[in-house]
Structures are given as C-alpha cells and as structure tokens.
Amino acid sequence: MNKDDISLAQWALVEEIQTGKWKTLDFPKIAREDFDLNGIEFVNTLFEVPTATYLNALKRNADDYGVAMVLIMVDDEGDGCASTKAERKQFEINHRKWIDIAHYLGCHAIRTNCRGNEIISKKDALRYAAESYNLLLQYAEEASIKVLIENHGGVSNDPDFMLALMKEVSHPLFGTYPDWREPADDFDNYAYLQKTVPFAKGMSYRNQPSEALTAKMIGLCKRSGYHGWYGIESDGRAAVQEGKRLLQKYLFNEV
C-alpha cells in the first residue's frame, strides 16, 4: 500500500465471539456498522469450518459492507523457531492452508508466531527460524501472500534477533508485524518498533498508556516511511473507538 488506513483486529472483540454474540461471518458488518472501519484482520482459531461455501459467504459479506479483508492471524499451527526439523517442516505444512485461504479471500498476508525454546542459543534459533520461513515462503510465492512475524514472546520479542532474521531470509514477502504492546520492564515497545518498522508490512496497533506515547509511535511510523494498515487490537469496544480517534487525529493530520 502507498497510503494508510485503519482495520479492526478480530482479537479486540474476542470475548464477544467467545460468548456467542456474533460469528466471523458477521465480522464485516461489525467493522462497518459499529466502527465504520475499512478493513478486518481475522484470527484463524475464530473461523468456523472454512469450507468453500463458508468462505464464499464471507467474501459476499465483505463486499456487501465494503470492507477489505487484510490478513489472517495464525495461532496453534506450530512455532516458526521449532527445535526439530520435523517440527519445522510441520510448521510449514500447517500454514499452507492459511496461505491458501488468505489468497482466496483477498488478504495480503498471514501472521505467524516465532518464539523458540529458551535452552537453544540465538545462533541456533536464527538457523531454525530461517529454515522454517524459507520453506513457507516458497509456498507463499505463487499466491504472493506475505508471511509476517508478530512479537509474541521468545526470540520474536528481541528486535535485534528479528533484524538478523529479516536479513538472513531476505525475501520481499517476509516482514514484521509489530505488536504495540504496552511498555514493560522487560520490553521497550518504542525501541522495538523503531528497529523493526523498516521491515513492517502491517501494524498491530494498541492504545498506549498516554496519548503522547501513542502520538509518538504513530509519528515514528510516518517518519520511517511505513504505509499500510493499522489493525486496532485494543481490548473492547471503547478501546477500539479510542484507537480510531487517535489514529485519525495523528495519522491523517499534521499535529
């Protein structure tokens, strides 16, 4: 994308889905009618059985509400930094179907997890992860689906490791998906974003403890030349609305 836009991450409203208030087929309607957002980002574990009939219904609903289907967050399908060759191969196999589904729906990417094992060295972790993602990217190439990593613990929380992995794999479809988690004693989310934004092909946006920090992080993305979707993953409806307000204020206006 050469412009910016705002999408709704399904996980932001996960409690509503888990309690049966609505289903994934309703997601385009929720994004448009309740939040007036232009894109949606799925979570694979919240799909019902993704048959062709089901996916066609989802495509119709997205078309009816004028909502772009952006990406699929993939969980429970293995670790991109698994320590055995068999597990790394299974990781690749398990993600193929989600690449296929993303392509069928018109999404541009899938999001993966890459944590690794605490007992392995960073050198081995880099080798394992590079092997996994080179395999997966070979499959993703035909469909031109991007393969992204979100900082969900382990080695993916280390921005220097992520930079080394991006450079080692060096594939145009490979990228980061920075999760704007709140800063913590063991995680500087601004520094993480600063290092990984050059490889970002999506943003998992979350409201920060202060509006000033939110504005600072949005400003960093703009100055770094990132253009694309900001998927609001802040927890709950009020937080989503606040995220939309802040993004509209600082992303689309010179403040």
Image (cartoon, grey):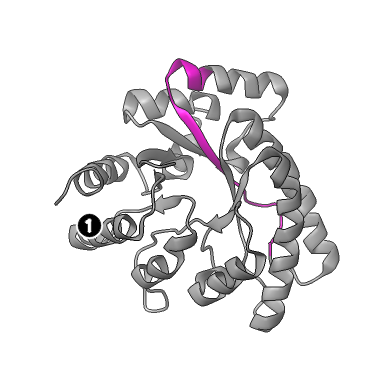
Residue 162 rendering spot, x and y as whole percentages: 55, 70
- For the N terminus, the quadrant is top left
- Determine if the magenta segment contains residue 172: no
Q: Name the residue beneath numbered marker 1.
A: 215
Residue 33 rendering spot, x and y as whole percentages: 34, 23
Q: Is residue 4 left or right of residue 245?
A: right
Q: Is residue 180 left or right of residue 250?
A: right
- Determine if the magenta segment contains residue 72: yes
* Extreme residue in the right direction: 86
Depth order, front residue of 67/175? 175
Q: Residues within 10 Å of mark 1 (few under 14, many from 20)?
A: some
Q: Which residues are magenta?
A: 61-80
Depth order, front residue of 173/193? 173
Q: Is residue 251 visible?
A: yes
Amino acid carrying label 1: it is: Ala
Residue 203 rendering spot, x and y as whole percentages: 43, 52
